Image (spheres, rainbow, N blue to C red):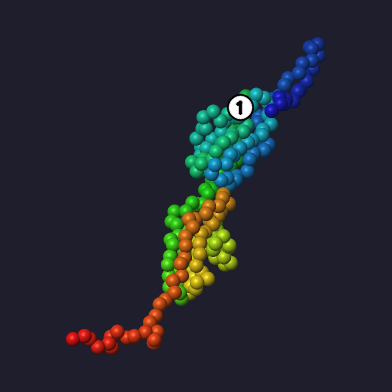
Amino acid sequence: SSRRRHTRYISVTGVQTCALPIYEAPVITYQSSSSNVCEGQSMTLSVSASGTSPLTYQWYKNGTVITSANGSTYVINSVTTTNAGTYKCKVTNTCGSATSSDIVLTVKTSPAISSQPSSQTVCSGSSASFSVTATGSSPITYQWYNDSTSISGATSSTYLITSTTAANSGSYYCMVSNQCGTIQSAIRSLTDRKSTRLNSSHTDISRMPSSA
């Protein structure tokens, strides 16, 4: 910040006129807003202040001094969940100090799949379902695919086929997304097995005479 002062002139009869500088305490003129950031991204917090130089800066997280955070900006190169918290900056000079309002940093995490779907073999007319379990910051969205084609309406963590046919056979997977990214589940197969029955032309072996 540039040096700012008011000058007051005093004149006394028979005495040379002199100027007395008046220095100003710091005033916060700008600060970063609270924000959400995804894990792994960079984040810069900053303040601007007026007042007579030199101005010194000290950043705090949750009320604790951040060592070496002594500039008007504080940079986190790769955010992790441990960086979540409430930040503020105190600006000081010889006339006093000013502290920014709280800057809340919320860290969001990318989706991760903790339970994968399973391949299935079912008889025609039976039900079949695929499920995933995912972690990560909400909201999490789901989209199921059959042989690389998105399935209309299949947007929950479980995809249910109430009555399978041969047309349902194929490969299935789910794309899981949130504001920080997208991850694909493992690809699993559905095999539709036709039911087999004995028809009337088959010989009923229970009625065949037994050999002596």
- Number of marks: 1
Q: Residue at x 65, y 24 (%)?
A: 54
Q: x%, y% of residue 204?
A: 32, 86
Q: Residue at x 58, y 29 (%)?
A: 70
Which quarter of the rendering shows the N terminus?
Answer: top right
Q: Which residue is at the front of the view, 135 or 175? A: 175
Q: Which residue is at the front of the view, 57 or 175? A: 175
Going by the numbered disc 1, the residue's amino acid type is Thr
Would you say residue 11 is visible in this rendering?
yes
Q: Which residue is at the front of the view, 65 or 203? A: 203
Q: Residue at x 61, y 27 (%)?
A: 56
* Position above or below: 168 against 63: below
* Position above or below: 40 against 21: below
Picture quadrant of residue 139:
bottom right
Q: x%, y% of residue 66?
A: 52, 32
- Residue most extreme to the front: 212
* Position above or below: 147 against 210: above
Q: Residue at x 40, y 84 (%)?
A: 199
Which quarter of the rendering shows the C terminus?
Answer: bottom left
Picture quadrant of residue 59:
top right
Q: Circle 1 — which element?
A: strand
Q: x%, y% of residue 196?
A: 40, 77
10 Å crowding of disc 1: few (<14), some (14-19), many (20+): some
Would you say residue 85 is visible in this rendering?
no
- Residue most extreme to the right: 13
Q: Which residue is at the front of the view, 58 or 209? A: 209
The residue under label 1 is 56
